Image: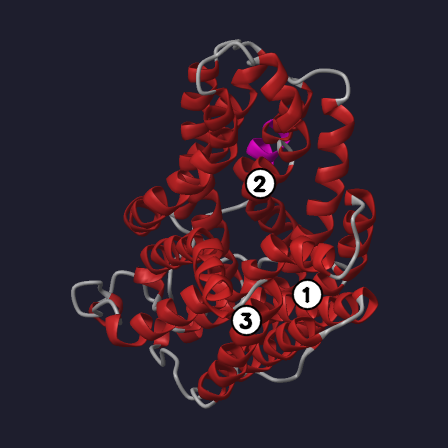
Amino acid sequence: MTTRRQAGIVQGIILSLVTFLPIMATVSLAPGIPLFLNHFKNVAHVNTLVPMLITVPAVMIALASPFAGALSDAVGRKRVLLTAVAIYGVCGMAPLLLDNIYALLVSRVGVGAAEGMLMTVGKTLIGDYFAGERRQRWIGYQSGIDACLGSLTWLLGGVLAGGSWRGPFLLYTISVPMFFAVLLLLWDTAPPAAGTAKHSPAVTKFPWRIMSIVFGITLLTSLMYFSYPVNIAKALRDLGIDSSGRIGALTAIASLGTPLGALLYARSRVRSSPILIGIALGCIGIAFIGIGLAHDYRLAIAFGFLEQVGNGIAGAATVTWTLSCLPFEHRGRGMGIWSAFLVAGIFLSPMVFGLISSQTGGTATGFLYLGIVCVAASLVIGGLRSLRFNGAASAAY
């Protein structure tokens, strides 16, 4: 049975934490990679298997998200979300008892499937619970919370890894209180007059024409979004910074731009997501061009800060735009496909940047040419300000 309750700050925080869980799953293990390599050093192909502990969940997100979204439309968001948190916790904590790398990989498959469900249904419920300005604020806050907690989790993962290679998996115990928070404080949603012909899925078709544009722009934005973190270290080395610790400190300073961008988005009075995406890609493109032309690492980091501000805006704006283009009865399915395109962009980003840089002369020119493409795309996307779903079901949420 569905209810018509008013969501508030408690639901917003819970859903922000729900969508952070997939980020935690990746960030928390990264500092422990050397320990995993040492512990399983006698296992054949260890140098391939250990990185898969991080990459396998990403593949599962892309595969599971569309199915999770469609399932949430069919059986209800809360049921799918509770199942996802339970799977995430069991599979996430399993390595505390396992000592076989292949068993660990199986557990990571389960974590990845749960991540796809969490990412999809968590963002779908943000769209269900909040509308208009409140939706924009909470998506912005959600992105800012993800960025801040990501940095904290990186630190905690490193600290826990200092005691044992199993240490970072203790972070998955957060799934226990999260399960009860979802169980007790969230609820299923329904559009106004649910079950009437006006809102019947048989009458309202999936808006493929609009969503094909949104999904394509999500893929492009994701490509741009992840080009910076993957390649900035090499750019700084080319500018004379040889210390990994110094590179880490400099990029950490620049990364403060991401929560700032998310906060600016949350407080923005501009309601058109395409315009905001255009502004974000403009910031990213100008930053890429600046990094490509920089002859001093300080200038590159200044442009890196601008790029991260653009990232903070882009990440939130693409979610808001996707939700605004989806009627209620197709929102889960649409967000699931959106998640798959987002992950596809992450996967393709290193290959695209590598191809461009290899053909144009190096990392700096890779940033330069990608920046030009990004600025051009920002002008085109900014002109799509009227593209949205205008159905009553969407307007209600």
Q: Amino acid at mark 2?
A: Leu
Q: Amino acid at mark 3?
A: Ala
How far across and how far down the image is residue 42, in percent? 52, 9
Count of labels in the image: 3
Mark 1 or mark 3: whose residue is earlier in sequence: 1
Disc 2 designates what residue? Answer: 21
Residue at x 25%, y 70% (from the top left corner): 208
Asked if marks 2 and 1 touch (Cβ < 8 Å), the reply is no
Residue at x 47%, y 81% (from the top left corner): 377
Mark 2 or mark 1: whose residue is earlier in sequence: 2
Pick the residue in front: 259 or 332: 259
Q: Is residue 27 left or right of residue 66?
A: right
Tell me the magenta residue range: 176-181
How far across and how far down the image is residue 180, in percent? 58, 32
Tag 3 secondary structure: helix
Label 1 Cα crowd, 10 Å radius (few <14 / some 14-19 / many 20+):
many
- Specify the label residue 308 is tagged with: 1
